Image: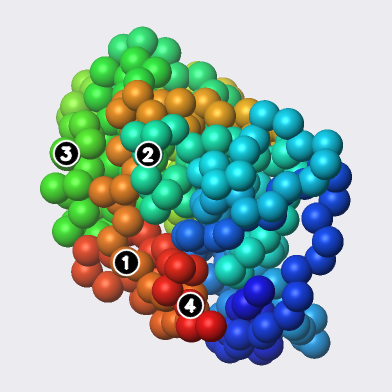
């Protein structure tokens, strides 16, 4: 097998080695695609103080090429998604059956590589408390924000406003059902006008930045709900907690850390994708060979015009 490992800051290198023997309750997956996670991009770009080599990759899809003696319910050649923390940037990966979800026939393996982030979105949406007729604001219209847009509309939001600096994403957001994509500077005025000063019932922060979290608190109504859906990984946050306190808002952490809950969200998400109620493949804007990991991560970090999501194709990797 071949695997990309992080050998230093901004430096993936490819290594070659044998696959470990498959355990009785595991399968071996020939990886077709592995998505590039923005949380991993942050890790790629900074020094890990000697923590190398470092393995990443957890948004995978592929086909089963080997299985242990105790495996049932999955067949050789079957298309699957798996929760495989830290090992997915490779031609092959092993996974326990408890971490697997079958891919529906009408969902491509490329789209299926988005299963893990879709699971995160499904789990966060289930905790968001969106009710029929709610006005929802999503601060951040990147890939994760666009997934959440689709889910809150399914939950019954009457209108969803997206907030982002990247105005070129407006056509995508509108096509997926957003009322509008507005700039952060205009967000409060537009929302005040749209709601007669009431503001949003639910605000979902989807960027992981301090500025977005601060803005989210300003856009939620009195006794509304603020959902922390972005991944905050780069230090402390200075927040106007007095505003949150005065408004009496509910603040919800949209993240899960249980593999069982991840897989549960994955099953629900892929069922929606199989029913064509959630669009996935149209959100993939960049595809790279697994040989080009550093380029894939550099593009994901710079976010050129039109960028939404990058995936790596491991069927293209050189022998």
Secondary structure at badge 3 equals helix
User: In which image quadrant can residue 46 be found?
Assistant: bottom right
Badge number at residue 317: 4
Give the CA distance from mark 1 to mark 3.
20 Å
Q: Nearer the viewer, residue 309 or 194?
A: 309
Q: Is residue 292 left or right of residue 154?
A: right
Q: Earlier in the sequence, mark 4 or mark 2?
A: 2
User: In which image quadrant can residue 255 be found?
Assistant: top right
Q: Residues within 10 Å of mark 2 (few under 14, many from 20)?
A: some
Whether residue 129 is visible to the viewer of this picture, yes or no, is: yes
Secondary structure at badge 4 equals loop
Q: Which residue sits at x=21%, y=54%?
A: 169
Tell me the mark number nearer the camera, choosing from 4 and 1. Answer: 4
Residue at image mark 3: 175
Give the CA distance from mark 2 to mark 3.
20 Å
Badge number at residue 286: 1
Tell me the mark number nearer the camera, choosing from 2 and 3. Answer: 2
Secondary structure at badge 1 equals strand
Q: Which residue sits at x=26%, y=48%?
A: 282
Q: Are marks 3 and 4 in contact (CB under 8 Å)?
A: no
Tell me the mark number nearer the camera, choosing from 1 and 2. Answer: 2
Secondary structure at badge 2 equals loop
Q: Position of residue 283 (x, y in %)?
A: 30, 51
Q: Earlier in the sequence, mark 2 or mark 3?
A: 2
């Amino acid at each position: 097998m071949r695997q990309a490992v992080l050998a230093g800051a901004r430096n993936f290198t490819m290594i070659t080695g044998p696959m470990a023997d498959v355990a009785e309750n595991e399968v071996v997956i020939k990886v077709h695609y592995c998505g590039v996670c923005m949380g991993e991009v942050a890790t790629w770009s900074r020094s890990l103080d000697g923590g190398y080599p470092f393995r990443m990759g957890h948004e995978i899809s592929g086909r089963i090429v080997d299985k242990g003696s105790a495996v049932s319910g999955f067949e050789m050649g079957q298309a699957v998604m798996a929760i495989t923390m830290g090992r997915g940037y490779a031609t092959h990966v092993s996974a326990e059956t408890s971490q697997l979800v079958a891919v529906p026939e009408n969902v491509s393996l490329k789209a299926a590589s988005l299963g893990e982030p879709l699971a995160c979105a499904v789990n966060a949406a289930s905790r968001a408390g969106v009710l029929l007729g709610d006005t929802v604001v999503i601060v951040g219209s990147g890939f994760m924000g666009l997934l959440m847009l689709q889910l809150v509309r399914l939950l019954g939001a009457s209108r969803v406003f997206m907030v982002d600096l990247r105005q070129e994403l407006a056509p995508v957001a509108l096509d997926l059902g957003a009322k509008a994509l507005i700039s952060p500077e205009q967000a409060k005025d537009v929302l005040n006008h749209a709601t007669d000063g009431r503001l949003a019932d639910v605000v979902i922060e989807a960027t992981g930045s301090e500025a977005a979290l601060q803005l989210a608190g300003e856009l939620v109504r009195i006794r509304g709900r603020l959902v922390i859906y972005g991944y905050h990984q780069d230090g402390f946050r200075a927040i106007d907690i007095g505003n949150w306190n005065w408004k009496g808002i509910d603040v919800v952490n949209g993240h899960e850390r249980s593999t069982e809950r991840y897989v549960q969200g994955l099953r629900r998400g892929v069922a929606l994708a199989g029913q064509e109620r959630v669009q996935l493949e149209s959100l993939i804007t960049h595809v790279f060979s697994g040989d080009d990991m550093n380029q894939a991560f550099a593009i994901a970090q710079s976010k050129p015009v039109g960028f939404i999501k990058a995936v790596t194709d491991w069927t293209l990797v050189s022998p």
